[in-house]
Image (spheres, coloured by chain):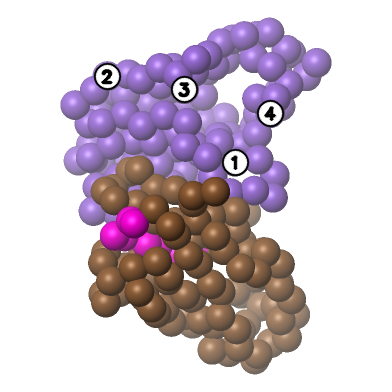
Chain colours: A purple, B brown
Amino acid sequence: KQEVTQIPAALSVPEGENLVLNCSFTDSAIYNLQWFRQDPGKGLTSLLLIQSSQREQTSGRLNASLDKSSGRSTLYIAASQPGDSATYLCAVSYQKVTFGIGTKLQVIP
Amino acid sequence: NAGVTQTPKFQVLKTGQSMTLQCAQDMNHNSMYWYRQDPGMGLRLIYYSASEGTTDKGEVPNGYNVSRLNKREFSLRLESAAPSQTSVYFCASNLKPGTSTFGSGTRLTVV
C-alpha cells in the first residue's frame, strides 16, 4: 500500500527566505507526482506535475524534484512571500492517487 | 469559468438525514472522483468513475453511494448521515491520472 509522508508538518519562515518542503513515498511504482497548494477553506490548486521519467519541473519561483528510486520529492520555493502562506500537498499517482497530509507554511512579513 | 463546480458549499445535517452532494465539470473529462479530507488524514478516495456509466469504490466507500449521471455530473449521496461523515468533500476530474482539477469543496457537519 502506497504511503506518502510530508515533512515538516508546519513551517514558519520570514519573508524572502528560500525554503524546501519534503515528500516521501513508499512505493516507487508511480506514474507521476504532483504538488498542490491549498488555501484555508478552498480547494486544491495544482502547482507542478512531474512525470515518473522526469527529474524536476520549474514554474516561476517553484522548483520540484523527483528521485523515484529513493521515493523522495522536494518542493523548493525561492524568495518566499506572505502570499505563499498555504498548505502544500504532495500526491503520487499510479492506479490511484495517494495524498500526503501536507505542510502548512506561514511566511511572516 | 471552466472547472469543477460543487454544490452546496456548506451543509449541516442531523444524524440519520440524507443528502446528495452535486459535482459538475465542463472540461470534457472522462474520470471523476470524490474525496473526503479530514484533519491529520489527508485526502481519501471515496468513489471514482473512470467513464460515463461506470463507478468503483475507493478507500472509504462505506456509508456513501454515487451516480455518474452523464459525462459532466457525478453525485455523492449519504443515505443516513452519521457524525463520522463530518468532513470536507472534494470532487475532482481528469483526462489522465495526476492531472486532476479539484472543486472548491463542500464542508459537511453532521450533528
Q: Name the residue under label 4.
A: A85
Q: Position of residue B87 (x, y in %)?
A: 62, 65
Residue B80 in the figure: left or right of residue A52: right
Quadrant holding the C terminus of chain A: top right
Question: Could you tell me the amino acid type at mark 3?
Answer: Leu
Question: Could you tell me the amino acid type at mark 2?
Answer: Arg
Residue A57 in the figure: left or right of residue B87: left
Q: In this view, does A3 lie above or below B78?
A: above
Report if the CB atoms under discs 3 and 2 are less than 8 Å apart.
Answer: no
Pinpoint the chain carrying mark 2: A
Report if the CB atoms under discs 1 and 4 are less than 8 Å apart.
Answer: no
- What kind of secondary structure does the magenta stretch mostly adopt? strand
**Tag 2's secondary structure?**
loop
Question: Could you tell me the amino acid type at mark 4?
Answer: Ser
Q: What stretch is highlighted in magenta?
A: B28-38
> Are discs 3 and 1 located on one and the same chain?
yes
Q: Mark 3 points at which residue?
A: A75
Q: Position of residue A28 (x, y in %)?
A: 23, 37
Report if the CB atoms under discs 3 and 1 are less than 8 Å apart.
Answer: no
